[in-house]
Amino acid sequence: MNALPTPLTLADVNALPLPEFVRTFGGVLEHSPRYAERVGQERPFARVEDLAAAFTAAVLADSPEQQLALIRAHPDLAGKAALAGEVTAESAAEQASAGLDRLTPDEYAEFHRVNQAYHAKFDMPYIVCVRENTKDTIMSGAATRLQNSPSAEWETALREIGKIARLRVLDLVRQDPQGAGA
């Protein structure tokens, strides 16, 4: 897994040529650099939070088909792709932060069961901002969310994607010590 790049200043972000912006922010939304291209065209941003919010707004403004493609681009938590190292560096680091890379065989089996149930009911992966959770709260949240209607779960998945995107932007852009970039 590669280390995250040195955070940029907001001024750096606003000055990046669009192709470099897309390379830098293309991983903010899982396997979906098209959103970085859209957000890059909205610059300049006055605050880092505005930049982060632009990613969520781009997703919410997209068609349901593209939203579903984004949702489905996310890997299963503690799934086979994660175990094989076939997820993005961002996802691998996030799953590791919640201990999902260090599960016991029983815990792995439980995650696999939940992932299967989730796909069977919603035809999409269970998405949660793992950096805001532990493996225990992720599992208990899955049990609760399996009770949701498909439309409620769709909305929840998009909210969680927004949280993930925000944290990824904050990893990439340094906050201005005077507060201008906050």
Image (cartoon, rainbow, N blue to C red):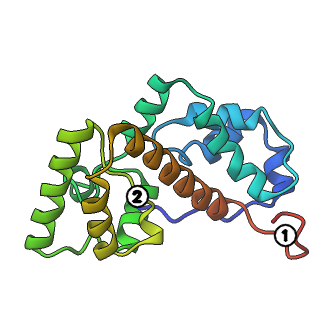
The quarter of the displayed image where residue 15 is located:
top right
Assign the N terminus to one quadrant of the image.
bottom left
The residue that disc 1 covers is: 176
Q: Nearer the viewer, mark 1 or mark 2?
A: 2
Q: Position of residue 23 (x, y in %)?
A: 62, 41
Of the numbered discs 1 and 2, the one sitting upstream in the chain is 2
Q: Position of residue 94 (x, y in %)?
A: 42, 65
Q: Position of residue 156 (x, y in %)?
A: 45, 49
User: Which residue is painted at 48% across and 26% down in the image?
Assistant: 64
User: Which residue is painted at 66% across and 65% down in the image?
Assistant: 6
Q: Is residue 69 left or right of residue 23?
A: left
Assign the C terminus to one quadrant of the image.
bottom right
The residue that disc 2 covers is: 128
Q: Amino acid at mark 2?
A: Val
Residue nearest the observer in this picture, 7 or 71: 71
Disc 2 crowd rating (10 Å Cα; few below 14, some 14-19, many 20+) is many
